[in-house]
Image (cartoon, helix red, strand yellow):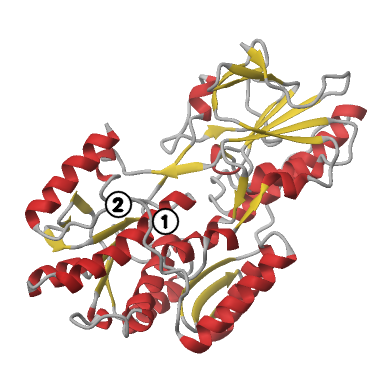
Amino acid sequence: MIDRTPAPVDDRPHVVVVGAGFAGLACASELGDTNIRVTVIDRRNYHLFVPLLYQVATAALSPADIAEPIRRIVSRYPNVDVLLGEVTGIDATARHVLLADDGYVPYDHLVLATGSTHSYFGHDEWEPLAPGLKTIEDARQIRTRLLLAFEQAEMSPDPDEQKRLTTVVVVGGGPTGVEMAGAVAELAKWTLARDFRRIRPANAEIVLIEAGPRLLSTFPEPLSAYTEDALRRLGVSVLTETPVEAVTAEGVTAGGRFIPAGTVIWGAGVRASPAGRWLGVETDRAGRVRVGPDLGVPGFEGVYALGDTALALDDDQRPLPGLAQVAKQQGEHLGRQLAAAIPHGRPMEPFRFKDRGNMATIGRNAAVADFGRMRLKGFVAWVLWAIVHVWLLVGFEKRARVTLQWLWRYLTFQRGARLITGETKAPVSASEANQAQRREAGRAG
């Protein structure tokens, strides 16, 4: 095996951060300009602003608007290096991070901030047919399937097939599902309305399916009720208490009812990265690694887990939610604690999450925000959501560009990134649907 440490080895302590999401980059930034060597490892060379990924999937923004090269973000810190590589395991005895290219990176302290992926609740065979939304590749695939389905509907002489192809099913009534359903409805109702001649995109059927009793279950019930009402005004059919039973290339079976659909989008669950398997520790049902108050993994000195990788508890012993603000606060806290503890031997203080509220956008002029005692909905919440998300983007250039694009889209009802890319094919008939399903299943296997 080859030592892939990017910086010359010296006597400074070495902190390895696996994952350049909100938690990993926050931790690395807090360790910047210290007498500690830091190596950030990620299999991609960019940091992705996941909360706006659905806008790439629905042709509102391009990938470059919400992604920033990792090296550029940490370039101001001479003690922070970046390694492009895929982690495959951890040798806790040798204190090595193992890489896919038969390399390794030794560490003194290890931070696992590897995020999460989709969970299909034991039905992984649905993944090729109902892509989730975690990466740029996912967003591009969904965008291609959406746009190609409308193109195929335009060419089909069969009204029933046209209806199937212009039906979009979104599974999951959390923030991802709600935002996706609203954005798809706006895309069909306004942006695509003048693009076609034989079909009427404004009549497309958007169906949001939630297995629980209401949408946005982590929000107060009045905001959930407002969300459902706002989606219905957009033309979205909302089905609650309707678990999904089957997904095929022709549609979705939910609550005993078959819904023919040309596009199915999954936003119902998440599963943590395989960090727990790398360490050989027990995880919860979502694959999260249990951590102590200092975010350390019990039984592994100098190993910490953050964000979606970690099962961290609040003061009432309830799991912290998988939110970007939780991950970022954990990263900032751990970075500060390590910066004080490593060179000076100070004890690690416990992490305390400060809830800064929860927000979700529904569509044009409609959003909800929960700040505890203060709850907002409608236009004011929508403007506040936009301000917060623009501010959280990395770099002034992206903030300015996204602001201008949103303003132009608001005034013109147009979306500029309506590109069909990749090799994904939308089935145009029942027979081709079955063939596509077999091809996708073969690729997945």
Residue with the most extreme bottom position: 411
Q: Please state, as top left, top right, bottom left or bottom right, where the N terminus lies in the image.
A: top right
Secondary structure at badge 2 equals loop
In depth, the one of 77 and 195 nearer the eye is 195
55 with respect to 328 (left or right): left
Question: Residue beneath label 2, please?
Answer: 424
In the image, 105 versus 362, the foreground residue is: 105
Q: Which amino acid does label 2 sit on?
A: Thr
- Confirm or deny contact between disc 2 and disc 1 (CB under 8 A): no
| Numbered tag placed on residue 140 in the rendering | 1
Marked residue nearer the N-terminal end (2 or 1): 1
For the C terminus, give its image quadrant: top left
- Give the x, y percent position of residue 81: 76, 34
In percent of the image, x 67 and y 41: which residue is there? Answer: 24
Q: Where is residue 365 in the image (x, y as percent from the top left)?
A: 50, 84
Q: In this view, does 83 lie to the left or right of 241?
A: right
